[in-house]
Amino acid sequence: MRVVRLLLIVAVAYALLWAPAAAGTGPGELAVLQFNMCGDACGTHFAVVNDLEKEIRQHPQQPFFVTLDEACRSQYDKLTADLSYRGYFATTIRDRCWDGTDYGVAVLVRSADVSLVGVWALPNPTEMEPRALACVRSSLDGEPLVGCVTHLDTDPKNTPSQVAAVARHASGIAGPVIVGGDFNALPANPAMRPLYDRFDEAGAPADAFTSGCSAAHCGTAAGYRHPTRKIDYVFLSRGDFTALGAVPTNAPHSDHTPLWATATLTPVPVARS
């Protein structure tokens, strides 16, 4: 009898150890993962997808939203096929990737409750690479929640109008809103003000940089290129979240590091009759 009980205890412990991590550890708690994959330019093809899947699976709190930049449609398809996520891929350049698939940005959601809010082309005064903002709607613990992704231009002449457009569109969406992306601008850049005026940043320490590695193997691990700039962000609509924080990790096959953000969604007060 003791042997049977011992086997049952071991089986339960094993099941708990290997059970998928929840999107949060308490009511309204969630993680968000922002990552510029360098999915085409770095030439790592599906190696970066395998890295991302491993990072998500091994993280103690699996992300509710995953916002991805420089992604190929084939990479997005593999992620949604392999993981318990749905989402939306927004094409910015057709047929650009090494395998002939579209190139763009994507948002993954750890939920079957996903609907498209909209995709907006961003201003492009200097006629550089097309840029977009894409947003989807879902819910967490019964509360509505919107996740958006964007990737802004490297030309600083385009930064003011593109940031302003992202802030305008995202702040005009009903419900709590999260915006992840590579903004190609430092926090002190005056062009970032429209976002800081309307959103709170899930801020990492000042020296927790996420880009500027100039090659794959980006991060603080031994032998990796150390990032030199902070241009990846997770912004959350003001007043809708508490306990904000963020930390970068390491990326074996990208010139950016993943940025993990955490927050707690503030419940909407129930109206009394």
Image: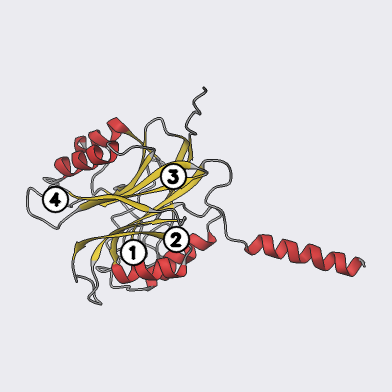
Do we see residue 3 in this rendering?
A: yes
| Nearer the camera: disc 4 or disc 2 | 2
Looking at the picture, which amino acid does disc 2 mark? Tyr
Upstream in the sequence, badge 4 or badge 2?
2
Tag 2: Cα neighbours inside 10 Å, few (<14), some, or many (≥20)?
A: some
Looking at the picture, which amino acid does disc 1 mark? Ser
Upstream in the sequence, badge 4 or badge 3?
4
Image disc number at residue 246? 3
Query: Looking at this rendering, what residue extends furthest in the right direction?
Result: 1
x, y percentage for residue 107?
35, 56
Q: Secondary structure at mark 3?
A: strand
Q: Which residue is mark 1?
A: 254
Q: Which residue is mark 2?
A: 85
Q: Is residue 11 left or right of residue 3?
A: left
What is the CA distance from the residue labelled 1 to the residue labelled 2?
22 Å
Query: Looking at this rendering, what residue extends furthest in the bottom direction?
Result: 99
Identity of the residue drawn at 23% across and 71% down: 97
Q: Is residue 66 left or right of residue 129?
A: right
Identity of the residue drawn at 44% across and 53% down: 113
Do we see residue 229 in this rendering?
A: no
Which part of the image, by quadrant, shows the N terminus? bottom right
Q: Secondary structure at mark 4?
A: loop
x, y percentage for residue 148?
32, 48
Looking at the picture, which amino acid does disc 4 mark? Asp
